[in-house]
Image: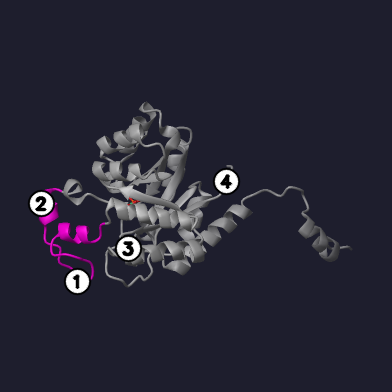
Amino acid sequence: MKYIKPLVIAEVGCNHMGDMEIAKEYIKIASIFCKVDVVKFQKRNNKEYLTDQQYNAPHINPHHSYGHTYGQHREALEFNVNQHKELKKTCEELGLIYSTSVWDLTSAKEIAELEPDLIKIPSACNNNYKMLAWLAENYNGEIHVSTGMTRSDEIEEIVQLFEHKKRNNDLIIYSCTSGYPVPFKDVCLLEIVKLREKYNTRVKTIGFSGHHNGIAVDIAAYTLGATHIERHFTLNRTWKGTDHAASLEPDGIRRLKRDLDSTYDVLSYKETQILEIEQVQRDKLKYKG
Ligand SMILES: C=C(OP(=O)(O)O)C(=O)O
């Protein structure tokens, strides 16, 4: 297998808690301290994405909720398209790629207007075929689709949709287990190998979206062939919200990027049977009896 340099995506998601200053702080830290490649957010048009019943459902959890109903909670965490434009600009000023996942057609259209390099479809919405088809026809960048909570026939349907639109060269599918956090026994990393074997020639590449603890799993995911590694990013795992606890803090994201880059460096064969570094040791240490 030929390894390409891993791309690390720090998924802020809604961990900014609806505050633009905090969102920009994430971008700064991701660039200057963690040195990742991509910072990712989320975009929802909640009234479109949720049914009335879901929107109006009570959402009372002192450590998670930002409103009395699920709709109010989601609205409090939402940025409008102009705010996303500002976040994209901040990313670009700091040398990062901006991305967001889109959860409904309106959000997809709004974000596509900003012309980001890539747009993500979360596992929860990869069955919104209208949105997938619209993106395949109208958006020119890469489309990254996560496959948590998705059967293999449904993944096949997604890939075929992009093939029919002749957009499979821009399609990246992510192995993912949807759970927050995911226990190790449910990470099922060999799904990456399965996706690679089945789709290697039919999509651009395979990614991994992880929700487990620590960073060892991500190194293994890359070694198994996932070129894009996405992890949730928080400034503080104890902050209020559903995703903070299953996220990495800045030092975790920094180490993730550093260790993935080192893994890329080590995944090679020896160019000569005895490397230069070894020759010195060979002369000194080899048994000369
Ligand atoms: C929820 C998301 O992704 P995943 O399904 O990969 O967790 C997202 O990108 O917003």
- For the residues labelled 2 and 4, say whether their Cβ atoms are less than 8 Å apart: no
- For the residues labelled 3 and 1, say whether their Cβ atoms are less than 8 Å apart: no
Label of residue 53 in the image: 2
Give the residue pinned by disc 1. 62
The mark nearer the N terminus, 2 or 4, is 4
Q: Residue at x 51, y 61 (%)?
A: 35
- Position of residue 59 relative to residue 267, above or below, is below
Q: Amino acid at mark 1?
A: Pro
Q: How far apart are labels 3 and 1 at the CA level?
A: 22 Å
Q: Amino acid at mark 3?
A: Met
Helix, strand or loop under label 1: loop
Q: Is residue 51 left or right of residue 287?
A: left
Label of residue 20 in the image: 3
Q: Residue at x 10, y 56 (%)?
A: 56
Looking at the rendered image, the disc whose residue lies closer to the viewer, 3 or 4, is 3
Q: How far apart are labels 2 and 4 at the CA level?
A: 47 Å
